[in-house]
Image (cartoon, rainbow, N blue to C red):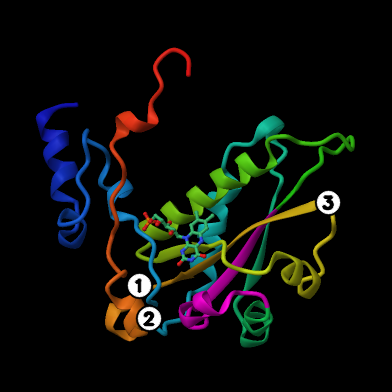
């Protein structure tokens, strides 16, 4: 990387991120500037914006290009009410105010009926594309694992061959002060362990 590129990356890091996240190596500012929000503005997400975000997920890589994912989208009040039935109360403190919620699920089987061992891995790639595309459009996301999967399956009538992954909250990032007090101080970009703790050179 040239010094110029490095400087451009650095200059694009937002001040709140700069204060909390330090890259060990130069990376595009996108990777640092995306962070998960709990506070959302009460501003609707336009249909075409949502479509672009899900389009990004459509182009995620998947084993044998099987694209095992489905996105169950809740954008009307009636649809979002159904999600309130299965999201855990500690998360509902903020998910109830997200303009869009969707549930990521994936088909566990290949078309020939054999198990697709990569369905969850592939759907994780789709989630990352959603998070980054949303960020590029000026929106924020937060994944939610704190929900009752059995209840969600029942309420949304999800067939047994699909595994449920995470609920994703999507919207325009709001001010932290709009959150209940216990969540306000957590509304900041968090850090990461050092890279070397994740790398195994050679074998385990
Ligand atoms: C699968 C998954 C489940 C998560 N579940 C919750 C959750 O139930 N409640 C919550 O507030 N955040 C949840 N998160 C958000 C993580 O805490 C967050 O992504 C992590 O702390 C890293 O922060 P960042 O996304 O801002 O970089 C979840 C994230 C993922 C990927």
- Asked if disc 1 is less than 8 Å from ligand 1, the answer is no
Region of the chain picked out in magenta, as a range: 86-105
The part of the image, by quadrant, that contains residue 188 is bottom left
What is the number of callouts on the image?
3
**What is the C-alpha distance between the residues marked 2 and 3?**
36 Å
Q: Residue 92 colored magenta?
A: yes
User: Which residue is label 2 attached to?
Assistant: 41
- Asked if disc 3 is less than 8 Å from ligand 1, the answer is no
Q: Residue furthest right?
A: 113
Between marks 2 and 3 in the image, the one whose residue lies nearer the viewer: 3
Q: Badges 3 and 1: C-beta atoms under 8 Å apart?
A: no
Q: Residue 95 colored magenta?
A: yes
**Which residue sits at x=51%, y=74%?**
91
Q: At which x and y percent is residue 171?
A: 44, 72
Q: Residue furthest front?
A: 204
Give whichever of discs 2 and 3 has the lower sequence position: 2
Q: At which x and y percent is residue 98?
A: 48, 78
Picture layout, residue 96 above or below residue 199 = below
Graded by Cα atoms within 10 Å as few (under 14), some (14 to 19) or many (20 or more), the crowding at tag 1 reads many
Near-viewer residue (25 or 181): 181
Q: Badges 2 and 1: C-beta atoms under 8 Å apart?
A: yes
User: Which residue is label 3 attached to?
Assistant: 161
Between marks 3 and 1 in the image, the one whose residue lies nearer the viewer: 3
**Which residue sits at x=19%, y=58%?**
14
Which type of secondary structure does the marked residue at label 1 adopt? Answer: loop
Q: At which x and y percent is residue 95?
A: 50, 77
Near-viewer residue (155 or 45): 155
The part of the image, by quadrant, that contains residue 176 is bottom left
Picture layout, residue 116 above or below residue 49 = above
User: Which residue is label 1 attached to?
Assistant: 173
**Which residue sits at x=16%, y=35%?**
5
């Amino acid at each position: 990387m040239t010094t110029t590129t490095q400087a451009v990356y650095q200059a694009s890091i937002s001040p709140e991120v700069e204060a909390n996240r330090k890259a060990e190596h130069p990376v595009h500012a996108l990777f640092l500037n995306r962070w998960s929000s709990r506070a959302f503005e009460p501003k609707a997400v336009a249909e075409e914006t949502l479509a672009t975000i899900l389009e990004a997920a459509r182009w995620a890589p998947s084993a044998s290009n099987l694209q095992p994912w489905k996105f169950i989208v809740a954008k009307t009040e009636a649809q979002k009410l159904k999600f309130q039935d299965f999201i855990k109360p500690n998360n509902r403190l903020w998910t109830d105010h997200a303009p869009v919620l969707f549930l990521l699920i994936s088909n566990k089987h290949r078309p020939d009926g054999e198990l697709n061992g990569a369905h969850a891995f592939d759907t994780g790639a789709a989630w990352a594309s959603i998070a980054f595309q949303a960020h590029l459009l000026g929106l924020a996301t937060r994944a939610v694992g704190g929900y009752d999967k059995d209840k969600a399956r029942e309420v949304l009538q999800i067939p047994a061959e699909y595994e449920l992954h995470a609920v994703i909250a999507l919207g325009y990032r709001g001010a932290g002060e709009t959150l209940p007090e216990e969540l306000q101080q957590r509304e900041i970009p968090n850090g990461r362990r050092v890279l070397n703790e994740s790398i195994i050179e050679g074998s385990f």
